[in-house]
Image (cartoon, rainbow, N blue to C red):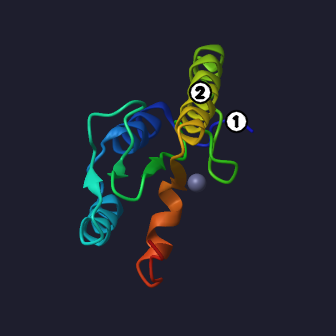
């Protein structure tokens, strides 16, 4: 699939994807903080949320940066650069997940596109 956006539009999208305090993420933050999670702790792999007591880490993965199977669109320019960078991210995601799991942690990965569906559901943690 090639990029359907113009260069300017793409860079605008990228900048939005890159910012961490996005609105849906803040909603999730409010929900989880009530349940004992800490937002963006300085821990290995930079999880978005951590609950030390329950040993749960949550990662909110951006659709572009972490190669979401539904929304990832291959950029038309610098294809090689992006491919390398994004595959590297995906590889590192797996590494981090495994590392936590091996130490007895539960790892939850959420795509940013899934957050909007969470608001009406009860979180079970
Ligand atoms: Zn997605």
Residue designated by label 1: 2
Instruction: Please tell me which residue lies in front, 108 or 23.
Output: 108
Rendered view: 57 above or below 15: below
Instruction: Please tell me which residue lies in front, 74 or 96.
Output: 96
Q: Is residue 95 left or right of residue 14?
A: right
Q: Quadrant of the N terminus?
A: top right
From the top left corner, tell me how far across and down residue 6 is, in percent.
Answer: 51, 36
Rendered view: 9 above or below 78: below
**Count of picture labels:** 2
From the top left corner, tell me how far across and down residue 73 is, in percent.
Answer: 64, 41
Question: Tag on residue 86?
Answer: 2
From the top left corner, tell me how far across and down residue 118 is, in percent.
Answer: 46, 74
Instruction: Evaluate if marks 1 and 2 touch, with contact meaning CB atoms under 8 Å apart.
Output: no
Rendered view: 12 above or below 51: above
Rendered view: 57 above or below 88: below
Q: Quadrant of the C terminus?
A: bottom left
Q: CA distance from mark 1 to mark 2?
A: 16 Å
Which tag, 1 or 2, sits closer to the chain's start? Answer: 1
């Amino acid at each position: 699939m090639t990029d359907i956006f113009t260069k300017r539009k793409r860079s605008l999208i990228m900048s939005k994807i890159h910012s961490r305090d996005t609105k849906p993420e803040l909603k999730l933050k409010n929900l989880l903080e009530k349940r004992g999670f800490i937002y963006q702790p300085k821990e290995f792999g930079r999880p978005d949320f951590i609950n030390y007591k329950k040993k749960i880490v949550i990662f909110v993965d951006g659709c572009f940066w972490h190669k979401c199977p539904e929304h990832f669109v291959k950029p038309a320019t610098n294809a090689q650069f992006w491919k390398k960078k994004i595959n590297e991210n995906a590889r590192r995601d797996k590494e981090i997940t495994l590392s936590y799991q091996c130490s007895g942690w539960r790892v939850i990965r959420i795509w940013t596109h899934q957050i909007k569906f969470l608001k009406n559901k009860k979180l079970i943690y």
